[in-house]
Amino acid sequence: MYEQPQVSINGDIDKDFGKYLELKSKDNSPIGGMFVTNMRNANNVDPDFTKLFDKKKFQTVPLNYDNSLFAHSLEIDKNNQRNGYGSQILDHCHNFTKQNGYDYLTLMVYDDNIPAKNLYKKMGYKKLNSDENVEFYFVEL
Ligand SMILES: CC(C)(COP(=O)(O)OP(=O)(O)OC[C@H]1O[C@@H](n2cnc3c(N)ncnc32)[C@H](O)[C@@H]1OP(=O)(O)O)[C@@H](O)C(=O)NCCC(=O)NCCS
């Protein structure tokens, strides 16, 4: 059995890389983390993504800068992978996003990143689009 980790959420959603969600074990050692950021602050979001977003390439889904946040840089420490922590931190991120009045979370992933793509599919993400070797996903919260 693994200990229930603690989650801290620090930073500013509109500045730098956004808010950082950090997972720590009970003895305070880091397990992993991720960022969530406002898409209006284009410095924090991959320009490939905003380019597609601004061109309204995703006609079938009503995503916009007021109803969506962008998640990036999710990483679970190698020794702690496959223990459910990635799912857990994403769950926190979904709650945080919804509680702050947003209906969607979006992200991008390299098309050969099978672990991450499996995780996102398991968490209910749907593919929006792809561009070269990158795929774009969203989840409705
Ligand atoms: C992707 C990543 C965050 C997953 O974190 P994790 O804590 O290992 O994920 P979980 O234990 O919550 O796994 C949830 C699901 O993800 C999928 N998954 C996770 N690791 C996998 C692997 N190595 N191979 C295949 N599927 C995998 C599975 O569907 C898994 O469900 P299951 O265990 O019931 O089969 C982790 O592998 C990682 O940090 N990778 C390196 C950084 C990275 O690629 N980040 C994503 C950037 S977009």
Image (cartoon, grey):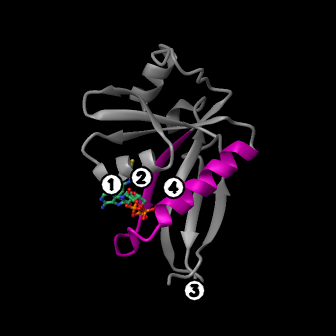
Disc 2, disc 1: CB below 8 Å? yes
Q: Residue at x 57, y 46 (%)?
A: 36
Q: Residue at x 24, y 44 (%)?
A: 112
Q: Residue at x 49, y 66 (%)?
A: 85
The tag on residue 49 is none
Secondary element at tag 4: strand
On the question of residue 12 being in view, the answer is no
Crowd around label 4: few <14 · some 14–19 · many ≥20 (10 Å): many
Rendered location of residue 116, percent (x, y): 37, 51
| C-alpha separation, residue under disc 3 versus residue under disc 1 | 27 Å
Disc 3, disc 1: CB below 8 Å? no
The tag on residue 34 is 4
The answer to whether residue 78 is above or below residue 37 is below
Quarter of the figure that contains the C terminus: top right
**Residue on which disc 2 sits:** 119
| C-alpha separation, residue under disc 2 versus residue under disc 1 | 6 Å
**Residue on which disc 1 sits:** 115
The answer to whether residue 48 is above or below residue 113 is above
**Residue on which disc 3 sits:** 27
Secondary element at tag 1: helix
Which image quarter has ligand 1? bottom left
Disc 1, disc 4: CB below 8 Å? no
What amino acid is found at the position of numbered circle 2 in the picture?
Leu
Which stretch appears magenta? 70-99
Which is more N-terminal, label 4 or label 2?
A: 4
| C-alpha separation, residue under disc 4 versus residue under disc 3 | 20 Å
On the question of residue 17 being in view, the answer is yes
Which is more N-terminal, label 2 or label 3?
A: 3
Observer-side mark, 1 or 4, equals 1
Observer-side mark, 3 or 1, equals 1
Disc 3 C-beta below 8 A from ligand 1: no
Secondary element at tag 3: loop
